[in-house]
Image (cartoon, rainbow, N blue to C red):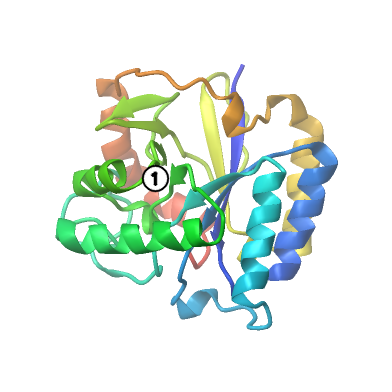
Amino acid sequence: MAKYLLRLDDACRFMNLQSWLKLEELFDNYNIKPIVAIIPRCKDETLIFQKDLSESGFWEIVNRWAGKGWTIALHGFEHIYVERMGWSYVPMWKKTEFAGLPIEVQAKKIKEGYKIFLDNGIKPTVWVAPAHTFDKNTLKVLYEETDIRIVSDCFAFDVFYEENMYFIPQQLWKFRKMPFGLWTICLHPNNMNRKEIDVIEKIIKTYRLYFISLQEVKLRKREWSLVEKFLNFNIWFNVLPKVKSFIKKGH
């Protein structure tokens, strides 16, 4: 049977705190432990929903999530994009914070972002690239400059191993009942309203036995199959208009 992970993107000091707290309460009620992608130094003006939360107050919340068993992910650095000129593992967007940039630039961003987590008592274990765009240099820097060995991204049917990293596939933005495989559903709490949160609760209530935490995923050095690679590099072009309709601002 298929298994599902939940991933929450764009946590930062300026997040829509009301929506995040509602989801946290929901997950507590059903013992759901999501992956949460945190921007260490957010400068993306589209993600400013409030300014009342202090820097220390935000990291207190992150530490609380970590204490509950939530998986903490490094989500880029500033969440500021440039036009993507180079190759990306996921060719989904033309914007990027990393893909195609010189390795020295990528290293500076990753090292500074990682240090912010460590300075606040958090050790992220997963990489989540803003706009899903990253390249082999991104993975090289992560391997050499951090202890992160897991990437949440790419289309596949299960965990695979590439460039010294374990990849947890991320393929959905809405729940879909699947016959097999491991599926990550990416949500953007900053843009979610009460109705959308209620829908998530109904889904979890109905399919609770199929939702797992990252800690329950068996990491293995399986090769990324040719079929999965083909789908990964082609599916975005075939279904991109539909996918984008599910994705709101602030990736």
Evaluate whether residue 85 shows in this view.
no
Q: SS of the residue at dot 1?
A: helix
The residue positioned 60% from the left and 25% from the top of the image is: 216
**Quick check: 88 above or below 245?**
above
Quick one: label 1, few (<14), some, or many (20+) residues within 10 Å? Answer: few
The quarter of the image holding the N terminus is top right
Q: Position of residue 149 (x, y in %)?
A: 38, 36
Q: Which of the pair 183/50 is nearer the observer? A: 50
Residue at figure coordinates x 41%, y 54% from the top left = 241
Image coordinates of residue 227 in percent, x first then y, are 29, 22
Give the residue displayed 31% in from the left and 53% down from the top.
133
Task: State left or right for residue 185 relative to residue 16.
Answer: left
Residue tagged 1: 239
Q: For residue 105, which quarter of the picture? A: bottom left
Q: Residue at x 55, y 61 (%)?
A: 120
For residue 15, side relative to residue 155 (left or right): right
Front in this rendered view, residue 33 or 112:
112
Q: Residue furthest right?
A: 29
Question: Picture coordinates of residue 27 (x, y %)?
Answer: 76, 45
Indicate the quadrant where residue 178 lies.
top right
